[in-house]
């Protein structure tokens, strides 16, 4: 309870002491009686009409104090309601964001699953195509046979072939193909027929 401002100082001090939250700070019963004996002299010396008027003022002051507390409590209650409303809006907004990202994540997962299914189908089709090609190749050999790539002949290899054929090669001369070198090393049939007589001729 609030202590009225016009209350006698003796009673005001006694009430504040007896309302202490810690028991050791409160006065004992004997101390309270002694304090009342001292403070009662001022109250007994006050006229009865003045004392009743002071009591009415004290009640009014206490009443105003409680009304103030009630109004402040209403304001606090309103502030609490406003705070709760804001927190609910923030929570609702956070839930909306979460639902949005969950939908995005679900869509990404669905796309990934579709892509995985398509890749699996392509892999299965590729294996089936390889099996068909192998079956056709086994039944009709050479169907899917690719043309071999002619190997590249290096100059050193050409020189070795020329030495084996007994053909001289000068540095800086143009390198010829192996088939031409072969034709140069072996005389043609026409030259052989003109140079040597056929057996049995006159």
Image (spheres, rainbow, N blue to C red):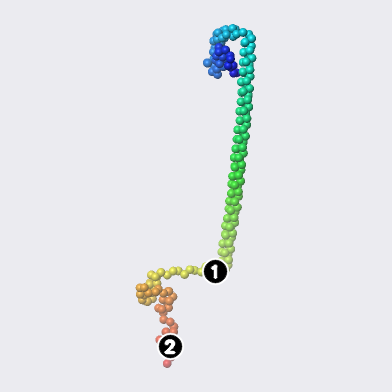
| Mark drawn on residue 142 | 1
Residue 192 vs 105, above or below: the answer is: below
Q: CA distance from mark 1 to mark 2?
A: 46 Å
Residue 71 vs 105, above or below: the answer is: above
Residue at 39% x, 70% y is 155
Residue at 58% x, 57% y is 122
Is the residue marked by circle 2 packed among few (<14), some (14-19), or many (20+) residues within 10 Å? few
Position of residue 10 measured from the top left corner of the image (x, y, whole percent): 55, 12
Q: Secondary structure at mark 2?
A: loop
Residue at 52% x, 16% y is 25
Position of residue 163 measured from the top left corner of the image (x, y, whole percent): 37, 74
Circle 2 is placed at which residue position?
198
Position of residue 116 measured from the top left corner of the image (x, y, whole percent): 58, 53
| Mark drawn on residue 120 | none
Q: Is residue 177 left or right of residue 134?
A: left
Q: Is residue 151 left or right of residue 91?
A: left
Residue 200 vs 119, above or below: the answer is: below
| The N terminus lies in quadrant | top right
């Amino acid at each position: 309870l609030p202590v009225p401002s016009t209350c006698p100082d003796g009673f005001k001090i006694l009430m504040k002491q007896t309302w202490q939250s810690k028991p050791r700070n409160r006065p004992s019963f004997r101390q309270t009686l002694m304090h009342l004996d001292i403070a009662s002299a001022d109250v007994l010396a006050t006229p009865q009409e003045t004392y009743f008027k002071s009591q009415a003022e004290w009640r009014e002051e206490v009443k105003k104090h409680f009304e103030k507390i009630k109004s402040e409590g209403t304001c606090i209650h309103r502030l609490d309601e406003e705070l709760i409303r804001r927190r609910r809006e923030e929570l609702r907004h956070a839930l909306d964001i979460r639902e949005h990202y969950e939908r995005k994540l679900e869509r990404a997962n669905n796309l990934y699953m579709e892509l995985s299914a398509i890749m699996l189908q392509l892999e299965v089709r590729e294996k089936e195509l390889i099996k068909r090609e192998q079956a056709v190749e086994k039944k009709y050999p050479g169907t899917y046979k690719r043309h071999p790539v002619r190997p590249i002949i290096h100059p050193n290899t050409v020189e070795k072939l020329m030495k084996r054929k007994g053909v001289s090669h000068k540095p800086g001369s143009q390198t010829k193909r192996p088939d031409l070198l072969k034709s140069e090393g072996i005389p043609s049939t026409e030259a052989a027929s003109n140079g040597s007589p056929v057996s049995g001729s006159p």
